[in-house]
Amino acid sequence: MNRKNDAFTLFEIVAVIIIVGLIAALALPNYVKAVNKADERNMLTNLKIMRTALTMFTGGGGTLGSWNSLSVINTNLDLNIADPKSTYTCGIDGTNGCTAVHPNGWAVQFHDEHSSGLIHCSAGTCPSCPAQPGNCE
C-alpha cells in the first residue's frame, strides 16, 4: 500500500510540474512583449525630453556635437535622464537629432533630415513604433 501512495504522489508532482510549465510557456512571450513595449515607451519619453532640450539648446546658440553617451547628453543639455538599459547618442550622424538603441537591437530616433523631427523606429523591429518615416508619438 505504501508503494501505491508513493507512485500516486510522484504522479501528482509530475502533473503539477507539467501544468506549471505549460502556464509559464504561455505567459512568458506576453511578459517579454510587455517589457519591450514598456522599454520603448521609456525610450520615446526620454527622446521627447531630449528633443525639447535640444531645441532650446540650439535656439540659445549652442551647437550640437557628437555626444555618444547618456552622461554627455545629460551634461550638455542639463538633463537628468537615467536609463540603464538603452544606449543614447546625439548628433553622431551629422543630423540634428538623437537615437536610442535597445539591447535587443531595435532603435528609435528623431532628426530633422527626413522626419521633420518626429520620433520613429530606425533599426530592427520596434515593439509598436512604426518604421520611418512613421511617427511614434
Image (tube, rainbow, N blue to C red):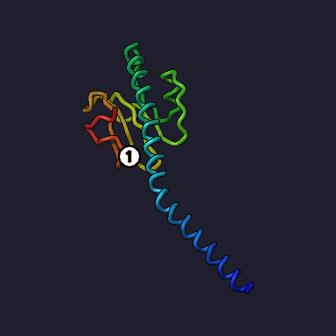
- Please identify the residue farthest to the right as the structure is shown: 2
Q: What is the x, y in percent for residue 126? A: 36, 45
Please tell me whether mark 1 sits on a helix, a strand or a loop. Answer: loop
Labels in figure, total = 1
Q: Is residue 10 left or right of residue 56?
A: right
Q: Which residue is mark 1?
A: 127
Q: What is the x, y in percent for residue 17? A: 59, 69
- Please identify the residue farthest to the front as the structure is shown: 1
Q: Residue at left 44%, top 25%?
A: 49
Q: What is the x, y in percent for residue 54? A: 41, 22
Q: Is residue 94 visible?
A: no
Residue toward you, 102 or 74:
102
Q: What is the x, y in percent for residue 130? A: 30, 41
Q: Residue at left 53%, top 36%?
A: 83
Q: Residues within 10 Å of mark 1 (few under 14, many from 20)?
A: some
Q: Amino acid at mark 1?
A: Pro
Q: Is residue 106 left or right of residue 76?
A: left
Question: Relative to 26, is 94 above or below?
Answer: above
Q: Is residue 10 visible?
A: yes
Q: Is residue 60 left or right of residue 115?
A: right
Question: Relative to 102, is 90 above or below?
Answer: above
Question: Relative to 23, is 37 above or below?
Answer: above
